[in-house]
Image (spheres, helix red, strand yellow):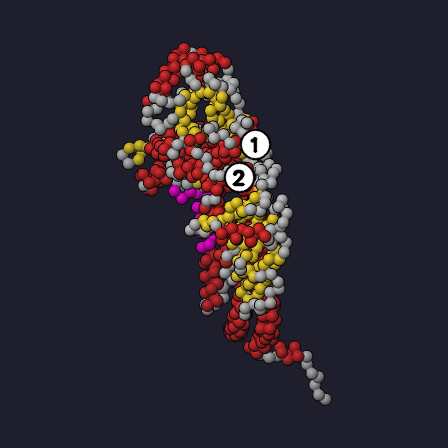
Amino acid sequence: MPSPRRPWIHSFRAQPLRRQANLLVIAVLVPTVVLQAVAVPTLLLQRFRSLEKRQLAGNGETLTKAYAREDARLRAFTKNFATWNETYRYAQGRNPGFLNSNLVPSTFEGGNVSIWGVVDRSGQILSAATYTPQAIQTGGAASATVRALLRRMPQDSARTASGIVAVGGRYYLAASQPITQDDGTGLAGRFLLARELTPGVIADIVPLGQDSRLSLAGPGADTTPPEPLSDRLTLPVTAPDGTPSATLRLTQTRFILEAGRAAILQIALITALSTLLTLLLGVTFIRRQVLQVVEEYDRDVRRMQRDSRHRLTVRGDDELGRLGVTINDLTDQYRRQYNEIQIMHQRDGLTGLLNREGLIRRSMPQSLRAAAVIQVGSLESLSGLYGAVRTDRLLLEFAARLREHAPSAFCARLRSDTFALLCGQPLETLLPAVQALSAPYPVNTGEVQLRVHVGLVDSEELQSADALLECAELALQESHDFGEPTRTYTRQTRQRLERARTLQDSLRTFTDETFTLHYQPIMDLNGQVPVSFEALLRWTHPDLGFISPAEFIPLAERGGHIYAVGQWVLRQAASDLLRSGRSTMKVNVNVSPLQLLSPSFAQDTLQALSQLGLPATQLVLEVTESAVLGDLDLATAHLNALREAGIQIALDDFGAGYSSLSLLSRLPVDVIKLDRTFLTEALTEQGARSVLAQVVVLATQLGFPVVAEGIENLDTLTLLRELGVRRGQGYLLGRPAPYADSLGRA
């Protein structure tokens, strides 16, 4: 009787272990190789094709947006000219100087255009020009181009239009706008600007990668097949009259698919090699029969995770045995080093004081009341002057004083130049240590005194170290802001700093809607007529409301925004004066001391006037004596350059602080403005009145016109007239007001 057949699993288990391992590896790896060689490449190729289509669609969307953005920019630039009173007057034949000041290279370069055209209501071309970096061409060719472009515009003369126009085998992005006055009334003709769409211009408007190429072709279906290994997307565009004018053709190299095919080939090779290597390593590993030892080690390691004192059970003196011994030794060494690192990680390497983490950990079980955060100033300067070694000795002495005079406090070095003291007693406990820091420190053969800023906290309730450090660092920041060596935290400290940060953020992104200018007249005291207007900056914050200049000007100076703000004030004041049409009026603009410290201040100022077209003789810049003395040589060079161009310089706030009559002959100024406090004292004190009279006489003898500020009552006005002061400003003569109610009022 034949024996029953055994299940295949029993036959498999009856084989030698080496054969079992080989069969098992083959059974696992063969399907894996087949899967990676067939299924994975197919999925990857589909994915690469999808990525290419998505990229092409994304580039098409980018192209559409870029074209719309350029079209909108050209329309806006055209509108600025077409709805300008100067253009309106030129179209009516009443502004002969219009072309001299506007048909200039800066107009074409600023608007990125190459074609200019102006026609009157009858369609007659008044001005036509084409621009290249070499010259502005006018004449027959320019007129023919403008006329051809206008023929593709809508016939409705009151309609604004833009689009791509093909003329003579060239393509132009053109926009035209009815010529009206500033308020939109009247119709004097049409104004046209256009930009030739050369390959370079197209690439500038639509920045695409090196794998994409953009071109223009005639309207209609694109029947030309794409190049090999490339894909294409076409977008039709229309002329301003609504008819098809061109086709934007985007060609994209199919580098993703080619790269994908190369990657799939590499994957196939790597898969074959890794499969062979895995097979060899697996068989070798099993042949050496290490599985049992490894499993024992695995159990020991798992136990070590629960019990750090447990170690591997080592059997034998072979490689695995020596491995077990090494692992045990390394584990012991790791535990020792870990404990040492934990201690070192909480200490400063130079001074031995706690660092921030050590301070938090050591003080965590306790509740604290007082804190002091001390920042040493100019450490880099000291290091450059005395060397790093001696500077380190200074810091060691600094730390020793903290320990000596605050023995019950936690002492820490938070940063390279910042230290901290924390204690559970009132703040008076820490003050001796803070005071000891101001004593001189020995260095070389002499002494040096460190400049420190200190933020203090004296809490009525016990708090954590984190909370006290945060408050102390806020007080330290406030000590810097107020220029004081020591500042104690109060409830208002956080509010002031948060408000300052909010204002700083707003100053960083200010726009024309953020600021406005008010103008205060400077009057002829005899004729009671304005001879100039002083531009005064006003700021209404969208969330905080009106912000005083006394608050935001220092913030702008500390945050590095004052130069940009000052340039905005200059340009806006010049624009407003031009807009007012007062060719004999002047405008006064205040200059920050930090603006005078900029090497390009004079150049930027003159460039702004040139761009805006304001004569230099209509601008008066007001500077203070302290601003000039900040860097007398640089400020004098700026002011001399500005005066040579025709700008007047007024010395503001004269009579306040440390004003010196001896400096009048040295400073390049044209006008002296008397400070309001000078006048107030002269009304009540005979000595101050005599000094004021002498200043007026001396200034007159030196040829300086005198302007009095702060005229708020008739007594002041009478006094000034008696002393011979001819000009003044103040609430009695006119308050600061918006443009429409001051400079812009007829």
The quarter of the rendered structure image containing the N terminus is bottom right
Mark closer to the chain start, 2 or 1: 2
Please name whichever residue, 420 or 602, is drawn nearer the observer in this view of the structure: 602
User: In the image, is residue 643 part of the stretch drawn in magenta?
Assistant: no
- Kind of residue sitting beneath label 1: Thr
**In which quadrant is the C terminus drawn?**
top right
Kindly give the residue lying farthest to the right in the view shown: 1
Taking the spot 52% from the left edge, 28% from the top edge, the residue there is: 743
Query: Of helix, strand and loop, which one carries label 1?
Result: strand
- x then y, percent, for residue 8: 66, 79
What residue type is disc 2 on? Gly
Residue 160 visible in the picture: yes
Q: Main secondary structure of the magenta part?
A: helix
SS label for mark 2: loop
Q: Nearer the viewer, residue 396 or 699?
A: 699
Mark 1 lies on residue: 540
Percent x, y of residue 322 = 45, 65
Q: Quadrant of residue 77?
A: top right
Which residue lies under the disc numbered 2? Answer: 93
Could you tell me if residue 398 is visible in this image?
no
Residue 429 image offset from top left, x and y in percent? 46, 28
Stretch of the chain drawn in magenta: 333-350
Task: Name the quadrant containing residue 36.
Answer: bottom right
Residue 365 numbered mark, or none: none
Q: Is residue 545 above or below residue 690?
A: below
Query: Within 10 angstroms of label 1, few (less than 14), some, or many (20 or more) residues?
Result: some
Q: CA distance from mark 2 to mark 1?
A: 42 Å
Residue at left offset 40%, top offset 24%: 671
